[in-house]
Image: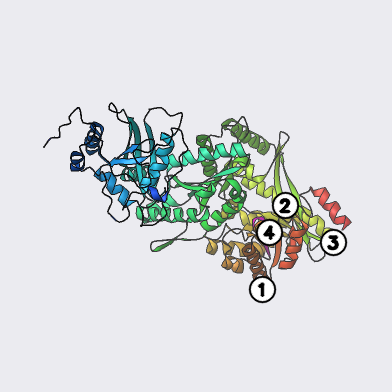
Amino acid sequence: METTIEPEIAYEPELPRVSGSQPRGEEASPPGAAYPGPRQADIPPGAGNGEYNAKNGSRAVVEEAGATRGAVFALQMLEAIPGCAYLFAPESLELLFCNRQGQQALLDSSGAPGEVPDPSVSLYHALLEHVGEYCLDPLRTNEPLCFELALNRPARRYDVRCAFLPPFPDEKETLLVCARDITAERAMVRDMRRLAESDPLTGLPGRARCRLDVERAVQAARQSGRTGYLLFAEPREAEAIALGYGADYADALLVLLARYFADAVPPPERGCGVFRWGGNAFVLLLTGAVAAGVQELVAALLGRGRQPWYVLDQALSCPLCVGVAAFPGGPDEDTGADALLKNAAAAAGEARLRESGFVFYEAEARQSGGERAALEAALRADANAGLRGFFLLYQPVVDLNNGCVTGAEALLRWQNGGRLFEPALFLPLAERLGMGEALACMTLARCCGLLAELRAAGRAEFTLSVNLSARQLDEARLLARVGEALNAAGANTEPPGLLLEISEELPVRELDRLLPLCHALRRLGAGLVFDNCGVGGCSLRLMRDLPAGVVKIGRAALRAARRDRYARALIRNITDFAHSLGRTVCMVGVESRADVDYCKLAGVDRAQGWFYHRPMEREQLLNLLEKQ
């Protein structure tokens, strides 16, 4: 049956109103009055127990009341609107009508009876809080209002749109509020974004998210002036594992690496992040206070990489290579996200060629293609000129018991064009150019010559140590070169004066092959030093089986011991174990009185560092020994 509205009808039915709202016939609040906010009395009657039924779209209610034209129009409009629809009186914020979906949403979010209303939980009170400010704003216009509303219990999101309806003659305007539940849509968008931004294998964020987060980190670093770091890490042997064991083992290794990186790096809440860049590469972002520990993190990554990875049913050996780039750079440098990622990737590519597996782009890989070509040409020129620009510096080693200099470490340097280069900057390129053997022979000859001079002066206990690279350990002529240098200088005596330093990270995987070589070097009259102990995996078997008379603890371990009690315990255990094997322990990187006191407390025998002496030339070393 259709309702006929006679023009002369002036009766306005008494609409059931929300408890606590302005009764009809009473003077309404003036426009622009401050909205007092939601109150307990504002909650619709029975909303918490299912009894609320006022104006829920029942056509009979309007027809029986002989409603005004505005009421009939509002009812028909609400019934046609999908989602939740509400009609408010703007001045009193009285809820006039709602459709059935709107009523059900009010019931679902109203809370328990007697509970204090919470706008973050109650849809009704959340609407009142937002719509009330809109209605009572003295500067408001009749433009529609759109906003998104989030509720906590149940977790729902609504797209809310509000508009004033023009009144019929002799009737008041009303406010239409439509709230569409978009919870499922937002969840679907989040899932799609997560799938688009994440790596399906590891679950880590992918390239798109990486670029976005890196760009944000660079901008924040520019504003704060604090340095951040970007690490590009990848496994060296992932391709070999895929070929030898199959793609399932390679994928399982990448998942294991992703978990390790995620545990090693602080969470995104601290401005950090771990990303899967593609292929076998991962990107690690460090910002804020966390960035100060980048050296310790790199040492931990490299140390973990030298240990076996237990993948499925196999224990796989797969060391890591890490490239690091710092940001923000100078004003003339391009330190956008793409440039920074390119720099870190270039450093990681260079790290694959180095025995350490690590390159810091800011310090070591900034040369452009032209600069690298010029560096290569300068190396070739010096090689043809009899290694003209290469020389040795010596850093003394001090006995902590009496403060006397008992030895020194020979450090190779290269000077070209007024610039002094350390081995990390030129040695990999020099070895690729075939200069490695000539440099090794020069170093051994000069050290053995200095030892012979010191032995003739009555300093038979003085020792000189020389670093051996991984490539030199693999060369067949190493024994011959060492033997020739010792015999030529007459330095093949006991106790050995020439000490060859073998880094802890080098022989772990090939200990059985290297042990015969080490024993052969010992028979020639050269001593051995177990170098960089405590920085990597710290193999106890290597320390036990290697015929080394000296164990050197790396500077990274000492740096960690300054603030980490576990690192201090590790140094103490290394010292005790070395002493039980009859080895001498030397600490590298001693830079303060506090370091000296700690070394003595830990039972260390010797120390080497800037606190005692910086690297010096041959004449300076001889003068120092004469004054001693």
Residue occupying image coordinates x 31% and y 27%: 166
Secondary structure, mark 2, is strand
C-alpha separation, residue under disc 3 versus residue under disc 2? 20 Å
Residue 155 percent location from the top left of the image: 36, 50
- First in residue order: circle 1 vs circle 2: 2
Query: Which label is found at residue 580?
Result: 1
Q: Mark 4 or mark 3, which is nearer to you?
A: 4
Crowding at dot 1, Cα within 10 Å, few <14 / some 14-19 / many 20+, comes out as few
Residue type at tag 3:
Gly
Query: Which label is found at residue 410?
Result: 2
Compared with 581, 344 (above or below) is above
C-alpha separation, residue under disc 4 versus residue under disc 3? 39 Å
Residue occupying image coordinates x 63% and y 36%: 380
C-alpha separation, residue under disc 1 versus residue under disc 4? 25 Å
Q: Quadrant of the N terminus?
A: top left
Q: Mark 3 or mark 1, which is nearer to you?
A: 1
Left or right position of 407 against 471: right
- First in residue order: circle 4 vs circle 3: 3
- First in residue order: circle 3 vs circle 2: 2
Query: Which label is found at residue 562?
Result: 4
Secondary structure, mark 4, is loop
Secondary structure, mark 3, is loop
Compared with 568, 438 (above or below) is above
Are the two marked residues, 4 and 3, in contact with CB atoms closer than 8 angstroms? no
Q: Which residues are magenta?
A: 550-556
